[in-house]
Amino acid sequence: MRVGILVNPLAGLGGRVGLKGTDTAEIAARSLALGAIPMAGARMALALRALPREVTVLAPAGAMGEAAARAAGFSPRVVGEPAGVTTADDTVRLARAMVRQGIDLLLFAGGDGTARDVLVAIEREVPVLGVPAGVKMHSAVFGATPRAAGDLAGRFLHGRAATVAVEVMDIDEAAYRVGSVSARLYGYLLAPYAEDVVQGVKIGGGRSDCLALASIAEAIAQAVEPDRLLLLGPGTTVRAVAERLGVVKTLLGVDLVRHGAMVAADANEQAILRALSDGASATVVVSPIGGQGFILGRGNQQMSPDVIRRVGLGNIVVTATEAKLAALHNQTLRVDTGEADLDHALAGYRRVITGVGIVAVCRVA
Amino acid sequence: MTAFHAARWNEPLIQELSEAGARGIIPPATDPAIMQAAGDVLSRLPKALRRAAPPALPEVTQHRVVRHFTRLAQMCMGFDVTTDMMGTCTMKYSPKVHDHVARDHRLADVHPLQDPETIQGVLEILYRFNRMMCAIAGMDEFTFQPGSGAQGIYTNACIIRAYHAARGDQARRNEIITTAFSHPADAATPAVAGFKVITLMPGAMGYADVGALQAALSERTAGMMLTNPEDTGQYNPHIREFVDLVHGAGGLCAYDQANGNPLLGIARAGDAGFDLCQFNLHKTFSAPHGAVGQGCAAVGVREPLRRFLPKPVVTFDGERYGLDVDRPDAIDKIRAFLGNVQTVLKAYAWVMSLGADGLRAVAETAVLNNNYMLNRIRAIPGVAIPWPANTYPKLEQVRYSWEPLFQETGVASAEIEDRLVDFGVQHYMTSHVPMLVPQPFTLEPGESLTIAEMDAMVAALRAIAEEARTTPERVRSAPHNASIGRIDGEIPHDPATWAFTYRAYLRKRSAWSGPRSPRATRKHGGY
Amino acid sequence: MMAKGAGFTHPYVPNAAPEPRRRLLAAIGVGDIDELYASVPADLRLQGVLDLPPPLPGEHDLRRHLEGILARNRSCRDLLNVRGAGCWQHFVPALCDEIVGRGEFLTAYAGGPYSDHGKNQALFEFQSLLGELVGMEVVSPPTYDAGAAACSAIAMACRVTGRRGILVPALMHPDRLSQLRGFTQPAATITTVRQDPDTGLLDLADLRAKLSSAIGAVYIENPGYLGSVETGAPEAAALAHAAGALVVVAVDPISLGVIAAPADYGADIVTGDLQPLGIRMYGGGGCAGFIASRDEERFVHEYPTMLITPSPAAGGGIGFGWSTQERTSYDKRHEATDYYGTTQWLWGIGAAVYLSLMGPKGMVELGQGIMARARYATKGIAAIPGVRVPGQNGVVFKEFVVDLAGTGKTVAAINRRLLGVGIMGGHDLGTEFPELAARMMVCFTEVHDRADIDRFTAALAEAVR
């Protein structure tokens, strides 16, 4: 069992001193000057204490991992060191180096920014779990607490947790600092999924995510009329639908499909509006963002209020695996199109396709 | 907590007790005259159908068989042995006298196809209990044929299907609506019966609201099948409006009364407008749960659905009891013959012992006990009560959450569940799927327990929560004082190591220590 | 009885009594129990009390009442019984009654590997012992009954093959066929295969003609519903396999000391009823089914039941877990293709005790003794003037058909006369199959001694005269 660990020592600094994120070296420096105390290493150590002792820990030198490992009582195998003050480039380079040396899991301490760097470095080559240490943690890759993350990592290493693709979200920090939220979907990491934690040996595991996706894809393929223009939103759920329709979909983009053929990949708002301009009847297929429940306005802003009105509120198909719905607070979906009137019109109750012949009804708020 | 230890016999498998030549029992002798007249009967079998070698059953002398199964019995935590609050199971005391009466040869040695005139007693019990259930549920006729709650709910789905088929509307009306916290059978059995299933998700109150139902209703609605209170112990107060809306859309309403214990004598399915319902006699009506055996569902219908009940229906002409088999609209058989009639007898006896006031006392006490447990468990650090917006008292059970404790310690509800056994009580139920409540546990104390028993359960939970903070490995490696130690959790799921018979176990045991592949992938063959 | 809120004293509801009730209400700070029902709208609350008979809270009074009703039954100990047809009178060892009557088992339920270790071991042993009888390495814990087991097994075969067609014997057990029709209505198509009404044997030519690439399951009963050993079963299985179908064989497990294990003549899945194995009839409540197959993943993944499996335990020994529960309707919910719930596990424990007692020799002696009695009975009955035993020249196990057409009397009339002399006559097949009017199916088992058989034969001769 080999675990690579990665600490972003600057993560979270901005939060304590009211600077929101810590995306640039300048903000990090300002934060430290304002008296922020680096916490990411301590939080990583907390997580590591939940790991089995026989685990081999790989870590970059010093504050990027080694120190935390030692604090938790491990003797890490040191893999490289940061070039100076830790940068995103260091995160990417050192994560790659650990993957090359062979690890079963990468545990990182940071926030959404760090998660983005990890995504750039390793995509879905090895499973990744985040120890929450940032200011913003919109991504589902993070454990709820350092202890919970460590615990889940331990279960995963013992073969008692499956993996699932989770969104890496981040918001524009500059905009966030002035009070505006504009979340973006950057991609997907593979994260351990703790079905075992709740179900235990007596019950065994649940259905695999992969089968649930296949069932969803089949259900939607049966439901949509081929001559409609399909606006396929981002994410693995909708990508599975596209595959079933015979289309290779972009993971992060909104793709337009008709008669089982790609009309436009990764279309922006203008391209979508153009495609709709001939008055064609269209259907939007979207899946909520994991953990948050946004079906519109997060990661798919290309489907603007104009687009949604053109398509028609009755032509929005929402789909999600049951596991994804279960993880939403009160199983509630959310919309944030940027227009209050439209959000209001979209609110209420909506059918969510969860598989062939099965539907859940969720509240949209 | 001092020194509980379960019986731990390390009892071998029965096959391991085999000694060549030993006999456990001698079958009835065959008269030599019969043998002579019949001739060599085995030689009449074609070679391919004649057993070549006797089955490889163990050879064990009688007293050792007695001890073997007595020891196995001692390693079980049934309600006769200890406290059992498993949620959704309605564990309660099953009076001994019922079992003694049921063993009477005038029930135990009755053949189901005897002429009605020779089983007037059986038919009388079925008939009388039918009328009692009609009074309890506000229905017009019951059948006791289904052998479990799930089969009872399946029966409801079949009746809904038959109703729409009789109106020529079966093809169009193909959707059943249920809720996320109804028993899984409310979703599974209509799916088996060919329906599409729509699940209403709970809102902030922990139950679905009227808007969710409205979004689900359409001209395709065949019916609604749900529990209320749901498996969370929360009663949906909008139930009458639900029923009216479903009726307005042309669907039928089936009330799964698996959680009916808190409503006996308080509220009736028929009065809420339901068209059909089902009760678990082995839960609410005290018939013993039989190690997952001898279940019985009482399925009740209102007059318009009476003609769809499965054959036979017990009749009474004022003098004699009979069996009505001339029922052209009846749904197909659900279970062989009349069902588990011994279970019906026990349920009948229970109602006869308690009467109307007693049933109401049962319901009220189940609710009172539950709210007492809630009050005490709420005070255990690390426990959360889901849906804080819902401030109604709970009815007969509560779905609690160990999420705060899990966040703090990493110890999961499933691990606490295993540790509970070390305290001399039956483990709890976590939750059915979907697991919408994180780290769930569900307790239903029922009406049978004393205050001391409830206090002991609370003390055990509190002690384990404390252990999770101080010595989490103690919890995680549990049980320590049970009849057996913690088992390997992967071996049961790996095709290379699972073994469903002794023969397979002998063949695969060697793979237990070798490298193991991960969990088996589930496969479908289509269909 | 007691005024509202004052309490109710009864041995089954301790906290309904005034003192504990007061204590509990005080502990939770509630003045009246009604406050706890705040979520139940007033207009749904029952006004008044349930209309039920006056109660009998005293145990003695209750027992007298119950036994008074049961006294209106005449059991198969009071009568000489030769009726079978899906539930059969067999010898029940005292130990079977003793063990299934033990409170620890009787009042256990959903306990897991640690709390109910003994229950799980007993059920694993049941699976194992039955596996030896049928020659299969996978056996389910009990299902509801043989009909439910047949439904599940046939549906499994259809899912494994991806085919919708089902072939069943035309003269199969009618209740089982009804269960199967209801269960497979949305998903499959049933076609019946002719059987010779005299011999009860499958018409293999008809089977061959109806086999096609659409057939997923061929269901065979052995012995058949009419009692004959299905001597064509090996050939039927070979034909089915050649057409790509799977073979489901329903057996009478008590026959398997002498009749070949179905696995040895081509069965892919085996079903049947446990009731003959030490379970009392209970007016049909003794019925309990099972499913068995080879240990292949494609089969195991389609079982709708729990499956109990050993697993090494910390500190030594083996414990028992439930395997791959995601197969069951508990996990699959609305994606379920079958359902499972509280089934007849107690009878599985009874059957495990029975097979442990009988051992290999007992099962062989039983099978031989039963076949000899049935054979002896056919000879005596066939000798009655006007009475025919059409299957006499075939092989019967414990049941066979008696043709009474030559007597000019109906089965009902004959049975009435038999009942008059304390005999529960055979099953009237005409009530199920119009073409079998005037035929009675009788059953002889190890409980019948020579005097019983001779008495029945003589009484029948008298009744048809």
Image (cartoon, rainbow, N blue to C red):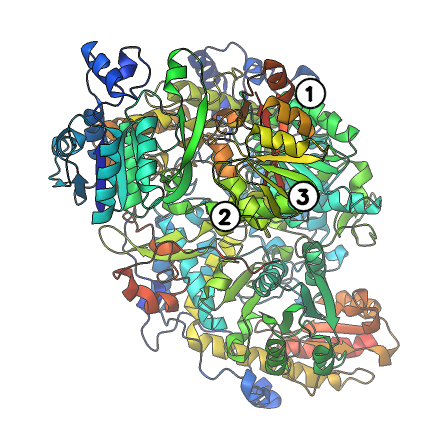
**Number of residues whose C-alpha sits closer than 10 Å to that of mark 2, classed few (under 14), some (14–19) or many (20 or more):** many
Label 1 and label 2: CA atoms lie apart by: 34 Å
Pointer 2 with pointer 3, Cβ within 8 A: no
Q: Secondary structure at mark 2?
A: loop
Residue situated in front as seen by the camera: B113 or A318: A318
User: Does label 1 lie on the same chain as label 3?
Assistant: no
Give x and y (percent) for residue A58.
18, 41
Image mark 2: chain: B
Give x and y (percent) for residue B455.
36, 24
Residue under circle 1? C44
Mark 3 is on which residue type?
Answer: Ala
Q: Is residue C48 visible?
A: no
Residue under circle 2? B290
Rendered residue at 73%/54% (across/down): B332
Residue under circle 3? A223
Which mark is in front, 1 or 2? 1
Q: Is residue C337 left or right of residue C126?
A: right
Q: Is residue B215 left or right of residue C29?
A: right
Q: Is residue B418 visible?
A: yes
**Number of residues whose C-alpha sits closer than 10 Å to that of mark 1, classed few (under 14), some (14–19) or many (20 or more):** some
Mark 2 is on which residue type?
Answer: Gly
- In the picture, the quarter occupied by the N terminus of chain C is top right
Residue situated in front as seen by the camera: A41 or C163: A41
Image mark 3: chain: A
Q: Secondary structure at mark 3?
A: helix
Pointer 1 with pointer 2, Cβ within 8 A: no
